[in-house]
Image (cartoon, rainbow, N blue to C red):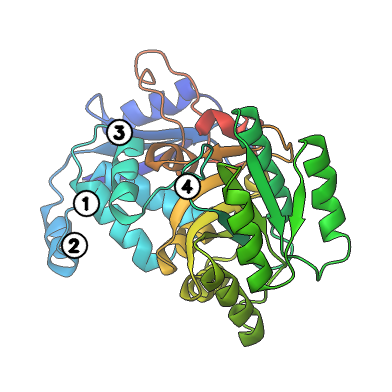
Amino acid sequence: MRLKCYTADSMAEAMAAIRAELGDDAIIVSTQRASDGNGVRITAALEGDDRAEDDIHVALTGNHRTPLGEAVREALEFHGAPPRLTELLVNLAAATPAHDATGACAAALDEVFHFAPMPQVGGSRPILLAGPPGTGKTIAVAKLAARARIAGQSVGVITTDSVRAGAQEQLAAFTRILEIDLKRAKSPDALAVQVDALSRDHGVIFIDSPGLNPFSQVDMDFLRSLHDATNLDVALVLNAGMDPMEAMEIADAFAEVGASRILATRLDMARRLGGILAAAEAGALAFGDVSINPQVADGLCPINPVSLARLILPMEDERAVEAPEPARPHAGHNDDTPYSEAL
């Protein structure tokens, strides 16, 4: 199997170069714009007699190389996913019966991760949003509350953040617009009382929390006490563009004290998503929603294996051979396409 990348000013020029070197039997694995926004970049493959190379690869890894698997590898390496996680996803992608790289990547993601969108209707446990300072917990609570209200739900909101200056006032400004009575809880016992009271009248409850240092035992003990005080779910809120190693350590710390989901924020300002992939795996956290813009009314989107694969890989154009058109680039490349189209 020969796998090669071609860069040219246009799709037509790239296709001509591929046919000249690899012939008409070449397989188009992926298409994307060049990293500087000018021209296109195509990954093409050709079945060949590279048995010696493949035999060595199989002997060392136990897996055959495939064009789709290599396309997934290239994308994950671009996003900075940890090597072990990359190998796992590539091997799963290579073993799927999918016909395109996005489908293969989605199947692999579905095998490795869980997906549990944030609740929009009644019947779910209260959700407490937790995370390090500055990750956007308060605005995420406002977005979740607004979405549930737009869906016609009765919503309760509680803040446990009495640390950050102006935190309660910021959330109160949003809840007033939504006609939601903001409740305050300064202790785990007070939180349990508020949750019990709101549960009688509200189908969905969201809880804000102060920014917590994952490497502070005092902060983690405080979060554990909130989690243990009442029957609730904890969602870790992290910036999408975090360093993968830092994200792994943070996720592991929050998972130890009860976090079960991850909500990725600032996706519109992230170019590489290896951090949230690493965090979700390290903490065994289910992917909830992602924040795609600063707007409160429509700034959140649920995520699933297919939409996550679309963010990781270029949007493939099945018509590329018959009617060449540049496909969307990596989510990590500069481009003006709204993230909601990939989601």
Q: Which mark is residue 65?
A: 1
Q: CA distance from mark 1 to mark 2?
A: 8 Å
Q: Nearer the viewer, mark 2 or mark 3?
A: 3
Q: Residues within 10 Å of mark 2 (few under 14, many from 20)?
A: some
What residue would you read off at disc 2? 57
Residue at the bottom extreme?
A: 217
Q: CA distance from mark 2 to mark 4?
A: 48 Å
Q: Amino acid at mark 3?
A: Asp
Q: Residues within 10 Å of mark 4 (few under 14, many from 20)?
A: some
Above or below, 237 relative to 44 = below
Q: Which mark is residue 100?
A: 3
Q: Amino acid at mark 1?
A: Arg
Quarter holding the N terminus?
top left
Q: Residues within 10 Å of mark 1 (few under 14, many from 20)?
A: some
Choose top left, top right, bottom left or bottom right for residue 307.
top left
Q: Amino acid at mark 4?
A: Ser
Above or below, 14 relative to 125 = above
Q: Amino acid at mark 2?
A: His
Q: Using residue 239 as the reference point, say whether residue 174 is left or right of it.
A: right
